[in-house]
Amino acid sequence: MSPDRPLALEELPARLWSELVRASRDRHHGWRLPVLATVDPQGSPQARTVVLRGADAALGELVCYTDRRSPKVSQLRADGRGVLVFWCARLSWQLRAQVRIGVEEDGARVQAAWARVAGQPAARDYLAPAPPGTAGLQGGWGTGGEPAGIADEPQAVHHLALLSARVMALDWLELDRRHGPRRAGVDAQGCAQWLIP
């Protein structure tokens, strides 16, 4: 696609998934850090930034990591519906993905994810002795940078879980000064249609 030619409707589904895959691998991509919105058991909206760790167009799946003790896990077990909102300033694109989220706490995919994270600074997040959001010194970590009670344990138990989000629909909005705003919807089967911005 030429930068001077607007993206055609039939090109949109493949291009969106291409950008999602790229974002899951490139920490500098604007879509790397979407906002995940859910509803808690009291009916209050909850939103938080997550990291996009995987995207599979064939499966229609997006993957993020979380601590299995996080409040969002119990919220998603009660109601798996959610929305992921992405913004990329470079593209001037917003993407809203309506998703159905499952939580994986064990199994081959979780262990493979942990193997990728274990040697990185992010591993600390999944080894902390207290759940996310708990009050305490540096989130439950000691002053030496090690989690309280973990430093002397060679086989510390991690709390990493996967959020597997099956995409039900995509809503794309382009804010382009040259061509004007454009909006389109893409359903779970990959069929796209123009929408009024």
Image (tube, rainbow, N blue to C red):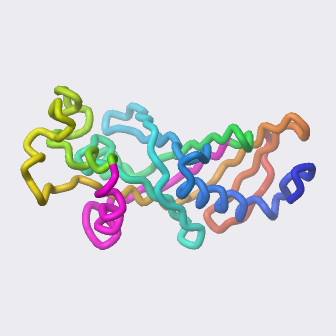
Number of marks drawn: 0
Where's residue 49, x and y in %? 46, 38
**Residue 159 shows in the view:** yes
Q: Is residue 115 above or below residue 51?
A: below
Residue 17 figure quarter = bottom right
The answer to whether residue 118 is magenta is yes
Compare residues 98 and 49 and report the one nearer the observer.
Answer: 49
**Residue 78 shows in the view:** no
Q: Residue at x 78, y 37 (%)?
A: 175
Compare residues 88 and 163 and report the one nearer the observer.
Answer: 88
Where's residue 33, x and y in %? 52, 43
Q: Residue at x 45, y 58 (%)?
A: 63
Where's residue 197, x and y in %? 78, 38
Compare residues 46 and 23 and report the one nearer the observer.
Answer: 23
Where's residue 129, x and y in %? 14, 42
Residue 113 figure quarter = bottom left
Q: Residue at x 41, y 34 (%)?
A: 46
Q: Is residue 116 above or below residue 121?
A: below
Q: Residue furthest front?
A: 144
Image quarter where the N terminus lies is bottom right
Q: Is residue 27 left or right of residue 186?
A: left
Q: Is residue 193 left or right of residue 55?
A: right
Residue 14 figure quarter = bottom right
Q: Is residue 29 above or below residue 168?
A: above
Q: Is residue 130 above or below residue 192?
A: above
Q: Is residue 103 left or right of residue 48?
A: left
Q: Which residues are magenta?
A: 94-120
